Image (cartoon, rainbow, N blue to C red):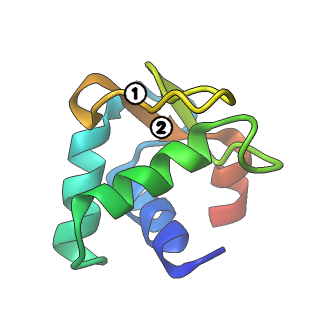
C-alpha cells in the first residue's frame, strides 16, 4: 500500500468507521486525513478512497462505499459530499 492508502485506513480506524457500524460521509474522512496525516489536496485523498471502494480497481475492496463511485467504463465518481464510506471487513482485519 502507498502512504496515502495507509493514512486513509488509519484515519478511518481511529474514527471508529468500522465495517459493522454506520456509514460516514466521505468528506468527513477526507477532512480528517488532510488535517492530521496527509497535508496535500483533498482531491488526491478522495480519489484514493474512490479507488479503494471500486470492485474493479483493487483485488480486494478495502473501503465499503455507499453511493456513486464510478464505473469500469470511465464514469467518474460523485462528489465526496454525496458518498458515504466505512472500512471493509478485510481492511479491518488488516488494521488489527
Which mark is drawn over residue 39? none
Where residue 43 appears, x then y in whole percent? 29, 56
Q: Quadrant of the C terminus?
A: bottom right
Q: How many marks?
A: 2
Q: Is residue 65 left or right of residue 27?
A: right
Q: Is residue 19 left or right of residue 34?
A: right
Residue drawn at (75%, 50%) of the image: 58
Q: Is residue 19 above or below residue 13?
A: above
Reading the image, the residue beneath label 1 is 23
Where residue 26 appears, x then y in whole percent? 31, 39
Reading the image, the residue beneath label 2 is 86
| Residue 96 visible in rendering | no
First of labels 2, 1 by sequence position: 1
Does dot 1 land on a helix, a strand or a loop? loop
- Label 2 and label 1: CA atoms lie apart by 5 Å
* Contact (Cβ within 8 Å) of mark 2 with mark 1: yes
Q: Quadrant of the N terminus?
A: bottom right
Residue with the most extreme right position: 59
Where residue 61 appears, x then y in whole percent? 70, 43
Graded by Cα atoms within 10 Å as few (under 14), some (14 to 19) or many (20 or more), the crowding at tag 2 reads: many
Where is residue 36, by image quadrant? bottom left
Residue drawn at (43%, 34%) of the image: 85
Q: Is residue 46 left or right of residue 61?
A: left
Q: Is residue 14 left or right of residue 86?
A: left
Graded by Cα atoms within 10 Å as few (under 14), some (14 to 19) or many (20 or more), the crowding at tag 1 reads: some
Q: Is residue 79 above or below residue 48?
A: above
Does dot 2 land on a helix, a strand or a loop? strand
Q: Is residue 33 above or below residue 71?
A: below
Residue drawn at (59%, 77%) of the image: 2
Front-most of residues 25 and 80 = 80
Front-most of residues 62 and 18 = 62
Amino acid at each position: 500500500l502507498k502512504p496515502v492508502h495507509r493514512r486513509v485506513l488509519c484515519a478511518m480506524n481511529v474514527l471508529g468507521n468500522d465495517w459493522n457500524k454506520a456509514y460516514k460521509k466521505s468528506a468527513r474522512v477526507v477532512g480528517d486525513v488532510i488535517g492530521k496525516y496527509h497535508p496535500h489536496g483533498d482531491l488526491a485523498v478522495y480519489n484514493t478512497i474512490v479507488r479503494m471502494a471500486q470492485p474493479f480497481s483493487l483485488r480486494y475492496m478495502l473501503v465499503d462505499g455507499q453511493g456513486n463511485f464510478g464505473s469500469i467504463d470511465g464514469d467518474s465518481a460523485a462528489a465526496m459530499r454525496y458518498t458515504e464510506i466505512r472500512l471493509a471487513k478485510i481492511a479491518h482485519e488488516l488494521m488489527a
